[in-house]
C-alpha cells in the first residue's frame, strides 16, 4: 500500500530516545523538553514555546489564557479538523463558523469583516454579538493544509474589533506569511506533532507566544499549577498537559530533518501539479499572496472525486476525503454559520488528499499519477 502521510524516522530519533531510557529521564522534566522548545523558537522566531501533550491541549490552554470564558464566542473557519472546534467547547464557549474563501480554502476575510461590522458592537473593550449579547472573545484562523489567509488583514480586523487571535497552526509548521512564520502573529499559535503532521513525536503539541508572562502562565497551568517548589500547593486549577522527555527527544531529532522534509514535500507537490493540470476540472488550492506554504497534506479538487477515491483505494493507494464541514456535524449544526454560498460544502464534496509522505519514493509518486491519469482516460 502507498500510505497517505506517514512518519519519516530516519535521523537521530533512536539515539536521542535511547539516551532518555539509559539515563531514566523519561518524564516531563528533562533536557530534551527544553531543547525541543528552543528548537521551535529558533525555527519559527517565536520568543517562547511551551510543549504540550498534543495540539488540542495547546489550543485548549491558549484559548483559556486568551480569556475565553463560558458563553463566549470564538470565530473559526467552517473547514477545519474537529479539534479546533471541540477545544472551544471545553471552555463552555461556542464557535461561530465562518465560511471559507473558494480559492484559498482559508477563512473568508471579507465575510468576517462584514459580519463583525454589521452584527457586533464594541462595549467595555469587548466585541458583543448584538443578537445574543454574547462576547466574541477570539478568532482562530486555521492554516488549513499549510496555506494561510492574509494575516496582515486578519490582524487588522481583530485589532479593530478588539478580538484576540489564537492561530491553529497545527498543520503549518514551515509556512510563512511575508517571511514571518505561522503561529507568531496572534497572541498564541499552536503546533501539532501528531503522527500525520510534517514532523511528529507520535503525539505532541507546542504553544508559541511572544508574551513572556503568558508563556510562564502556560507552563504553570500545564503542570498542575503547582506554586511551591516543595509543598503541594496549587494556586489554580491546572492540567497535566506537558510533553514527556522521550517524545521531546524524538521531536528534537525530527526538527533536525524539517528543512529536508519541506524540500521533499515541495518536490512531490510539483510532480503532482505538473501532471494533473492536464485533467479537465482539476483544481489546486490557491496559495495566498505572500504565503510560502509547507505543502503538508496534498489535497486537490478532482472531478468525480468519490469514484476516483474508490479506484485508488482498490489499487492500494491510500486517499482521504476532506473533513466534513463543521456545520454538517450534529454537535455543531445549530451554531451560527456565516456563509453566502456554503463554499465549505462544495470544497468538501470535491477534494481528495493523496499520498505525500516525506519518505515517498519517486516511483510511488509515478504510480499515484498514472493511476489518477488512467481514471480520466
Ligand atoms: C492535527 C490538528 C489539530 C490537533 O492536533 P492534535 O495534536 O492531533 O491534538 C487541531 N487542528 C487541526 C486543524 C489539525 O489538523
Image (cartoon, helix red, strand yellow):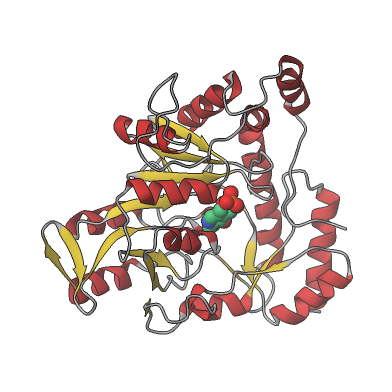
Q: Position of residue 201 (x, y in %)?
A: 66, 38
Q: Is residue 91 visible?
A: yes
Q: Position of residue 330 (x, y in %)?
A: 54, 80
Point out the image quarter for the N terminus. Answer: bottom right
For residue 111, above or below residue 153: below
Q: Is residue 170 left or right of residue 230?
A: right
Q: Is residue 182 visible?
A: no
Splitting the image into 4 quarters, where does residue 101 fall?
Answer: bottom left
Residue at position x 61%, y 43% in the image: 193
Ligand 1's quadrant is bottom right
Residue at position x 57%, y 41% in the image: 53
* Residue farthest to the top, as pictured: 23
Point out the image quarter for the C terminus. Answer: bottom right
Splitting the image into 4 quarters, where does residue 218 fall?
Answer: top left
For residue 130, above or below residue 182: below
The answer to which of 143 and 191 lies nearer the viewer is: 191
Residue at position x 71%, y 67% in the image: 320
Q: Is residue 32 left or right of residue 223?
A: right
For residue 217, above or below residue 329: above
Report how many numbered discs are placed on residues in the image: 0
* Residue farthest to the left, as pictured: 124
Q: Position of residue 366 (x, y in %)?
A: 82, 57
Q: Position of residue 13 (x, y in %)?
A: 73, 28
For residue 169, above or below residue 208: below
Residue at position x 18%, y 58% in the image: 160
The answer to which of 256 and 54 lies nearer the viewer is: 54
Q: Is residue 172 left or right of residue 265?
A: left
Amino acid at each position: 500500500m502507498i500510505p497517505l502521510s506517514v512518519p519519516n524516522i530516519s535521523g537521530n530519533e533512536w539515539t536521542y530516545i535511547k539516551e532518555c531510557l539509559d539515563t531514566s529521564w523519561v518524564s516531563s522534566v528533562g533536557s530534551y523538553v527544553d531543547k525541543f522548545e528552543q528548537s521551535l523558537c529558533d525555527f519559527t522566531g517565536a520568543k517562547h514555546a511551551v510543549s504540550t501533550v498534543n495540539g488540542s491541549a495547546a489550543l485548549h490552554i491558549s484559548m483559556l489564557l486568551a480569556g475565553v470564558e463560558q458563553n463566549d464566542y470564538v470565530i473559526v473557519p467552517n473547514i477545519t479538523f474537529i479539534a479546533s472546534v471541540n477545544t472551544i467547547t471545553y471552555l463552555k464557549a461556542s464557535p461561530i463558523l465562518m465560511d471559507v474563501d473558494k480559492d484559498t480554502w482559508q477563512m473568508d476575510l471579507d465575510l468576517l469583516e462584514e459580519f463583525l461590522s454589521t452584527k457586533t458592537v464594541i462595549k467595555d473593550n469587548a466585541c458583543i454579538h448584538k443578537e445574543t449579547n454574547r462576547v466574541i472573545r477570539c478568532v482562530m484562523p486555521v492554516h488549513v493544509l499549510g496555506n494561510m489567509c492574509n494575516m496582515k488583514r486578519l490582524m487588522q480586523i481583530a485589532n479593530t474589533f478588539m478580538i484576540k487571535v489564537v492561530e491553529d497552526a497545527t498543520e503549518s509548521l514551515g509556512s510563512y506569511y511575508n517571511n514571518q512564520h505561522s503561529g507568531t502573529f496572534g497572541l498564541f499559535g499552536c503546533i501539532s506533532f501528531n503522527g500525520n503532521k510534517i514532523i511528529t513525536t507520535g503525539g505532541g503539541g507546542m504553544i508559541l507566544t511572544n508574551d513572556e508572562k503568558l508563556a510562564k502562565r502556560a507552563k504553570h497551568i500545564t503542570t498542575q499549577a503547582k506554586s511551591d517548589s516543595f509543598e503541594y500547593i496549587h494556586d489554580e486549577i491546572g492540567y497535566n498537559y506537558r510533553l514527556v522527555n522521550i517524545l521531546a527527544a524524538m521531536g528534537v531529532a525530527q526538527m533536525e530533518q524539517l528543512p529536508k522534509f519541506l524540500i521533499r514535500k515541495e518536490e512531490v507537490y510539483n510532480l503532482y501539479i505538473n501532471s494533473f493540470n492536464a485533467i479537465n476540472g482539476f483544481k489546486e488550492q490557491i496559495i495566498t499572496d505572500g504565503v510560502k506554504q509547507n505543502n503538508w497534506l496534498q489535497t486537490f479538487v478532482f472531478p468525480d472525486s468519490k469514484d476516483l477515491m474508490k479506484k485508488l483505494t482498490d489499487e492500494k493507494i491510500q486517499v482521504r476525503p476532506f473533513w466534513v464541514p463543521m456545520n454538517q456535524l450534529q454537535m455543531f449544526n445549530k451554531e451560527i454559520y456565516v456563509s453566502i454560498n456554503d463554499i465549505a460544502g462544495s470544497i468538501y464534496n470535491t477534494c481528495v488528499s493523496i499520498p505525500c509522505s516525506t519518505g515517498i519514493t519517486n516511483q510511488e509518486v509515478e504510480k499515484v499519477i498514472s493511476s489518477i491519469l488512467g481514471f480520466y482516460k
